[in-house]
Image (cartoon, rainbow, N blue to C red):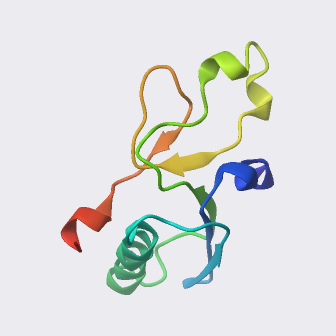
């Protein structure tokens, strides 16, 4: 399911047994990817053993991507894509943009 978001993702973040792994797919403007990873690393450090295993795809643009109108009635094919912004017309999963703290 997560793989469906790869064509729109800038990077993939995987947590297994408290360790973070990242796979970068595309250039990211400024350092949004770096500060997202930094925020997750802080969670792992502050809450050892309490962050579950995760497999997440992120896009780092300023505009939502997964328009609801593109999927019509078949919601089972919506790629799970985390993003720093969203609106009522999209399925993007909103995630905090920690990069503002790092610029």
Q: Say which quarter of the image contains residue 23.
A: bottom right
Above or below: residue 72 compared with residue 38: above
Residue that appears at 46% across and 50% down? 61
Q: On the rendered structure, is 21 left or right of 6?
A: left
Above or below: residue 76 compared with residue 8: above
Residue that appears at 71% across and 42% down? 79
Residue that appears at 63% across and 56% down? 9
Q: Nearer the viewer, residue 17 or 60?
A: 60
Residue that appears at 78% across and 30% down? 76
Quadrant of image for the C terminus:
bottom left
Q: Nearer the viewer, residue 80 or 60?
A: 60
List x then y, in percent, for residue 92: 53, 38
Q: On the rendered structure, is 91 left or right of 70?
A: left
Q: Nearer the viewer, residue 95 or 61?
A: 61
Q: Say which quarter of the image contains residue 66.
A: top right
Q: Say which quarter of the image contains residue 101.
A: bottom left
Q: On the rendered structure, is 50 left or right of 19?
A: left
List x then y, in percent, for residue 60: 48, 56
Above or below: residue 70 compared with residue 27: above
Q: Nearer the viewer, residue 48 or 88?
A: 88
């Amino acid at each position: 399911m997560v793989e469906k978001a790869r064509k729109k993702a800038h990077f993939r973040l995987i947590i297994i047994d408290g360790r973070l792994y990242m796979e970068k797919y595309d250039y990211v403007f400024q350092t949004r990817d770096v500060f997202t990873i930094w925020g997750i690393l802080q969670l792992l450090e502050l809450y050892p053993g309490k962050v579950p295993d995760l497999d997440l795809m992120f896009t780092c643009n300023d505009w939502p991507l997964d328009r609801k109108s593109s999927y019509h009635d078949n919601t089972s094919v919506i790629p799970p894509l985390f993003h720093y912004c969203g609106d009522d017309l999209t399925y993007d999963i909103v995630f905090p943009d920690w990069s503002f703290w790092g610029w």
